[in-house]
Amino acid sequence: MLKNNYDFIVVGSGPAGACVASRLASNKSSPAILLIEAGIARDASNADILAERWTSVSLFPNSVEYHTTEPQKWLNNRFINYDRGKVLGGSSAINMCAYTIGPKDDYDRWAEIVGDASYGWENAVRIRREKLEAFHSVTEEEFRGYALPDMSVHGEHGALAVSIPRVWERSMITQLDAAKVSGLGFNLDINSGNPLGMASVPSTAKDGLRVTAAKAYLENAPTNLTILTEKQVVKIILEGKRAVGVQVASGEKYYASKEVVISAGAVETPKLLMLSGIGNASELEEHSIELLHHLPGVGKCLQDHLSIAFCWRKKKSDVDWRQHFSNPDAVEQAQVQFRENGTGPLSLFFQGLTMGFFKADEVLHTKEFEGLEEGMKAHLRKETVPIWELTCHIPPCTPGALAAPEHDYLTSFVFLHNPQSRGEVTLSSASPLAPPRVNPRFFSHPFDRLCAVAATKRALAFIRHPSMAANIDFAVDGPASDCDDDVLDYWRKHATSTWHPSCTVRMGTGEDEEACVDSDFRVRGLQGLRVVDLSVLPFLLNCHPVSIGYLVGEIAAEKIASDYYS
Ligand SMILES: Cc1cc2nc3c(=O)[nH]c(=O)nc-3n(C[C@H](O)[C@H](O)[C@H](O)COP(=O)(O)OP(=O)(O)OC[C@H]3O[C@@H](n4cnc5c(N)ncnc54)[C@H](O)[C@@H]3O)c2cc1C
């Protein structure tokens, strides 16, 4: 029978929560850990095939919390998709499996902002080498000139499988060769600490199968780790200024003699804190929630990466997957073959992506740049810090391409890094089952708009370079012209979130009035309560951040263990 008392309770089983729960449970003192997840425990053996990573949100509807933002004023008042994983493993079970860690300068900035070397590049490398990564590089000889992982910064025996494809698709090679000759820049290892240049990006996968946080950390859980699924935590129970347990929607209460750790993600964590009476006094008052602890920064400072897709019709096909995926019988056969012996089309398609991070120094000589605070300006000038990202090896997803699926397309995404727009997560009601209001205020900052124009022009210049243009017939979806107004108009009409919400329960020093947790993840002013997920980032790192979720989990587990068991 399920007991009610534990040493630690962890709420949410995404990359950060699964990692912290599993690492604490493995401590030699064998503490009793309860991990509570609102979503289902999806069978890891079902169709988690990497080649089908694009369809995970539609393939597993019962693993998704469907959501949109508030209307985005600077994006023509559009509602932007804000889905999240609601399943064991969190969003790692529905994401696109791109594994990037970002620039080393970001880590050192994080350490500097919060005054704690644990977050610096050196320690991040130690954790990835010793605990986190199980790097598989099985690339066949003929492709090795395109990827050479720097194994001095990667781990080989950690919890999370990270892989580079065995065989690379033709169109990826075209894109990487073009990056080499066009001046865009090429990178043999996007995760070396310097992400600048086009590269083949590794995946959180092994042998062509997605690896979720649940697979990496929760399979074969020790008996002192109890995992409860389909239980939504609706309240953190406080006794005075100490967290002592949680209550779930069905009414049961669970108690933690040591600590409660909230890892519900950057949207749900601030919501849960506010529902529990921890947040900005005036906002709680608006919803008649009793204020137990005034913490003004809860839900503030939301950051995310804005992105946009462009599409061109190709003259001739240089991909093999279009015909495959448009034939349902072939898809079914390939699934059977892949499940039987891991071979066939599904072992070849979309095993890798071409992706690169880039600077755009023209934005450094503008009034928008001059308007930024000095620390940010200095950071943007650092050697490894990008302004934008280009991803190319993507199936057609824009309206023009979807309307004529019988053709081959080049689809590219441009992402904005170092976003300056700041949003917030607020309550829509005091009911725990009501979705929160999410307002990223995308594109509200002039610097983001400036960078969108610069990034688009640079991306278009790459596609127009003869090495890429040789196979382009005409543009299908993109700005009407290269002039700034048309580029901005295209972004306003079509830009989307990259589903990288972060920074809503920000880590910081005592001088930062809106900082909610200290660098040991402790909620300021309370005992027995930590937040461990992407909410705590002081700024959104310039990468796809699942890697940072795992890193945060590993760092928190070390800190908590050292407080209780060293
Ligand atoms: C569609 C999509 C594609 C993405 N693609 C990529 C990619 O290719 N590469 C990359 O690096 N990143 C990607 N991301 C982002 C990445 O997956 C997330 O940044 C990462 O999973 C965040 O980790 P987390 O631990 O902070 O939270 P989450 O992964 O959000 O996990 C939080 C967990 O807490 C649970 N929970 C929430 N509230 C409660 C509650 N009240 N009680 C109990 N449980 C609760 C949720 O159900 C969820 O399982 C993508 C995200 C999405 C949605």
Image (spheres, rainbow, N blue to C red):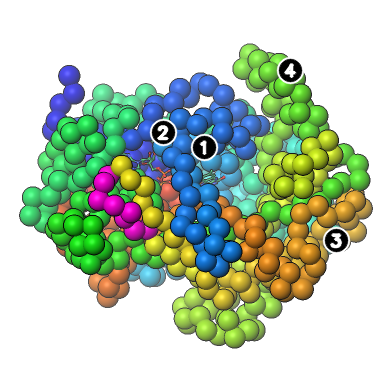
Q: Which residue is mark 2?
A: 87
- Mark 4 vs 2, N-terminal side: 2
Report the front residue among 376 and 485.
Answer: 485
Three-letter amino acid code at the position of disc 4: Asp
Label at residue 464 = 3
Q: Is residue 117 above or below residue 362?
A: above
Three-letter amino acid code at the position of disc 2: Val
- The reply to whether dot 4 and dot 3 touch (C-beta < 8 Å) is no
- Mark 1 vs 2, N-terminal side: 2
The single residue placed furthest to the left in the displayed view is 240
Three-letter amino acid code at the position of disc 1: Ile
What is the magenta range? 425-432
* Magenta stretch holds residue 169: no
User: Hey, which quadrant is residue 482 in on the image?
Assistant: bottom right
Residue at coordinates 15% horizontally, 60% vertically from top-left? 291
- Mark 3 vs 1, N-terminal side: 1
Q: Which residue is mark 1?
A: 94
Point out residue 148 in the picture as x, y percentages from the top left corner: 68, 47
The residues tagged by marks 4 and 3 sit, at their Cα atoms, a distance apart of 37 Å
Beta carbon of the mark 1 residue lies under 8 A of ligand 1: yes
Q: Quadrant of ligand 1?
A: top left
Circle 4 packing at 10 Å, graded few (<14), some (14-19), many (20+), is few
Beta carbon of the mark 2 residue lies under 8 A of ligand 1: yes
